[in-house]
Amino acid sequence: MNKLIAIVGMSGSGKSVATKYLEDKGFNKIYFGGVILDHMKKNNVEITPENEKKYRESLRKKHGMGVVATLLLDDIKASLEQNDTVLDGLYSWDEYIILKKEFPELNMVSIICDKQLRYERISKRLDRPFNEAEIMKRDISEIENLAKGGPIAYADYYVVNNGSLDQYIENIEKVIQKIERSK
């Protein structure tokens, strides 16, 4: 059976690096944010960080906190039939519950790192940089409005990303090996 791994964590923790690493190892990637962006495009909503946040929250308010997972179930099934699959962008507890019910083999990997280091990384991003006040506001919004804390706290595995990129990749590889052994 192919592996299904969801990468969770706060903004700037290193989720994209972990996802890219798994893609480079041959995993298929399913990007949860793509559902939001696709809906915004279909409704002619300009794609900006502020609009994306508003749209994401309104979509979840209207259809429930698990809407993105529900919309992606068929894509995940098809991907998993072909190959190992990594999920990028699982946010809410409801999404986790939906996915775990449908895919008992789901492994959730939480990427964690010190808050100030995350803020520093985000401020230096070329794509969507935020200052400290903006990222603090985003963190709080994601925890309060998107129930992001549950999946992070309840993950099956944790990867600490406070050091060098090489150390981080080594930590990711150790978790992948643990997942392999648990099959």
Image: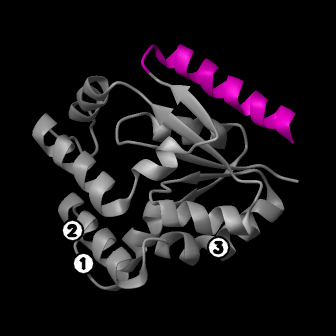
Q: CA distance from mark 1 to mark 3?
A: 25 Å
User: Where does the magenta region start and end?
Assistant: 162-183
Q: Nearer the viewer, mark 3 or mark 2?
A: 3
Please tell me whether the stretch drawn in magenta is mainly helix, strand or loop.
Answer: helix
Check disc 1 and report the residue beneath it. Answer: 45
Of the numbered discs 3 and 2, the one sitting upstream in the chain is 2
Of the numbered discs 1 and 2, the one sitting upstream in the chain is 1
Could you tell me which residue is drawn at 48 percent across and 54 percent down?
89
Secondary element type, mark 1? loop
Which quarter of the rendered picture does the C terminus lie within?
A: top right
Instruction: Name the foreground residue: 16 vs 146.
Output: 146
Residue 172: image location, x then y, percent: 62, 28
The type of residue carrying mark 1 is Val
Q: Sort mark 3 into few (<14), some (14-19) or many (20+) by Cα contacts within 10 Å.
A: some
Q: Sort mark 2 into few (<14), some (14-19) or many (20+) by Cα contacts within 10 Å.
A: few
Check disc 3 and report the residue beneath it. Answer: 73
